[in-house]
Every structure is written in C-alpha cells, then in structure tokens.
Image (cartoon, grey):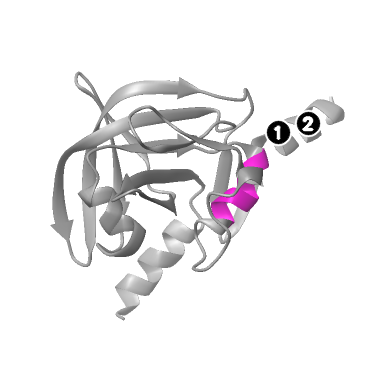
Amino acid sequence: MSQLSDEFRTAFRHHPAGVALITATVDDVPYGLTISSLASLSIEPVAVSFSLAKESGAAGAVLAASSFVIHMLGEQQDELATNFARPGAPRFTPEQKFRILPTGEPHFIDAPVAFRATLHSSVSVGGSRLIAAEVHEILHGLSEQHLLHQNREYLRISEFLNASTSRQ
C-alpha cells in the first residue's frame, strides 16, 4: 500500500461518521453488513449513497437483492453494529429486535430511522463499489441520538451534550 493510501486511510479513520446497517434477503436467507459511508444523495428522487468494499457475502447479497433496508443506528445499537461488522458474530437473533417486512427485508425496529430502498445505479472505483440507492419508504423507530464511529470506536453525541450541559 502506498504512503498516500496510508495517509488517506488515517485521515478518514479520524473523521467521525454515522453508523448504518444494511439488510437484505436473498433466496430466503437474511444478510446484513455495517457501513459508515452513508450519505444523502438526492431529494428528487429521494436517494442515498454508500460504498461497499467487496461484492461477495453480505455486500453481494445487497447488490443482488430486489430491495434492502438501510438502518441509521442509534447510540444503544453499538453491539448490533459490531455483530454485523465481524464474521461469525450473532446476527438476526430475537434479542436484536428485528422483523421481516411485508416486502421481505429484515428490519431492526429500534433503529431511529431506516430506509427501504432499491439499487438505482453503481460504479466500481478501485476495489470498491459506490452505490446510489433510491429510497421508497422511511421507517421510524426509537427516538434517540445516532451512533457515530471514529478511529475504531463508537461515539455517542448524548455523552458530549450531557457533559456540555453539566458544565453550564
């Protein structure tokens, strides 16, 4: 890996990002993966973008699925995010509070916001794929701050807000 690549990776490691979980069902098998690259893309049509580092496993399932759900995770869902980021970790257990939507996708009901979406378009960039996804439905869950990730750790905005309030 080049020095530029190393510096680039370090720069983004220190850039806080929201944590999202994407789920899909392919051939009656549920799949999911954690991402931190979710971004707003368009208002008309309503669309988001994200990147996938590979095109196999859960990422391949998202690409192959007719639709998928993108969950913006809440502060209390750090364990869920970790489970879907690590191979072999527990996924789709009753304790994780998910249901299958009438359209077939797994939906984690405690996520503050989730988007049911379909693939609009994608482009390969190096070893990754940039996805544009059209949003068809917005699902609301628990009202809480969203989970952030920075430098391999989860951050909770409420902790900063509480600390700021207590200093006043």
Quadrant of res 144: top right
Determine which of the numbered discs, if any, sits on residue 1 in the image: none
Q: Position of residue 121 (x, y in %)?
A: 14, 41
Instruction: Give me the C-alpha separation between circle 1 and circle 2.
Output: 6 Å
Tell me the magenta residue range: 76-82
Residue density around tag 2, few if under 14, some if 14–19, many if 20 or more, within 10 Å: few
Determine which of the numbered discs, if any, sits on residue 162 in the image: 2
Left or right: residue 46 compared with residue 125: right
Residue density around tag 1, few if under 14, some if 14–19, many if 20 or more, within 10 Å: some
From the viewer's perspective, is residue 59 above or below residue 110?
Answer: below
Helix, strand or loop for disc 1: helix
Type of the residue with mark 1: Ser
Left or right: residue 13 compared with residue 97: left
Determine which of the numbered discs, if any, sits on residue 158 in the image: 1
Type of the residue with mark 2: Asn
Q: Position of residue 164 (x, y in %)?
A: 77, 31
Left or right: residue 159 compared with residue 131: right
Marks 2 and 1: in contact by CB < 8 Å? yes
Q: Residue at x 62, y 22 (%)?
A: 143
Q: Residue at x 45, y 66 (%)?
A: 10
Q: Residue at x 33, y 63 (%)?
A: 57
Specify the principal SS of the magenta part.
helix
